[in-house]
Amino acid sequence: MSKKKLESKNAPAPVGPYSQGVVAGNFAFVSGQLPIDKAGNLVLGDIEKATDVVLDNIEAILKEDDLGLEDIVKSEVYLKDLSNFDKFNKAYEKRFPLGIRPSRVTIEVAKLPKNSDIEIACIAYRKK
């Protein structure tokens, strides 16, 4: 099985020694994305806006391999404050409105890189 790096100039550079994403076979693995907007600003204090920015970043990375949010089969969501769960779900649902939504785990964590409120990683699948 071959693998290749996924990298988008329309998403923030990694904050550590990892790739934005990696394609292996029919799967694309996107590393955890923070809510860093195109201007390089970290979105804090508004979980709905932060969720949109993270999903924009994921979408930009997937687009590099002609994939989209609709191809995501699994997502991992890390929230610094689980009391934001309902607001997060509201923003998330707008991006995955119909069809088969990705399986998902949502976990509250004590701290995230750059003191972010949210981080999302995912796996996408390319149909043959």
Image (tube, rainbow, N blue to C red):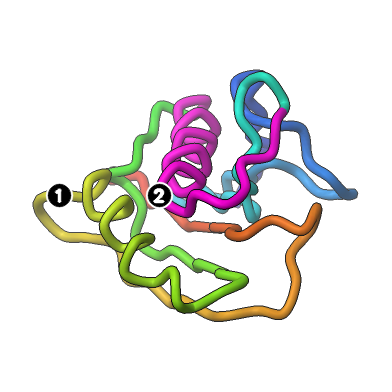
How crowded pointer 1 is (Cα within 10 Å; few <14, some 14-19, many 20+) is rated as few
Reading the image, the residue beneath label 1 is: 97
Q: Secondary structure at mark 1?
A: loop
Q: Is residue 128 left or right of residue 34?
A: left
Of the 4 image quadrants, the one containing the C terminus is top left
Q: Nearer the viewer, residue 103 or 114?
A: 114
In the image, what residue occupies the spot 39% across and 72% down?
A: 85
Residue 32 at what x, y percent from top left?
A: 64, 55
Q: Quadrant of residue 119?
A: bottom right
Q: Secondary structure at mark 2?
A: helix
Tell me the CA gap for discs 1 and 2.
Answer: 15 Å
Q: Say whether disc 1 or disc 2 marks the residue closer to the N-terminus.
A: 2
Residue 84 at what x, y percent from top left?
A: 44, 69
User: Which of the two discs, 1 and 2, sits closer to the camera?
Assistant: 2
How crowded pointer 2 is (Cα within 10 Å; few <14, some 14-19, many 20+) is rated as some
The amino acid type found where label 1 is placed reads Pro
Q: Is residue 81 left or right of residue 13?
A: left
Q: Nearer the viewer, residue 60 or 92?
A: 92
Residue 23 at what x, y percent from top left?
A: 58, 44
Principal secondary structure, stretch drawn in magenta = helix
In the image, what residue occupies the spot 65% across and 36% down?
A: 36
Residue 100 at what x, y percent from top left?
A: 16, 60
- Determine whether 30 is above or below 86 in the image: above
48 drawn magenta: yes
**Numbered circle sitting on residue 48:** 2
- Determine whether 79 is above or below 13 in the image: below
The amino acid type found where label 2 is placed reads Glu
Residues drawn in magenta: 41-64
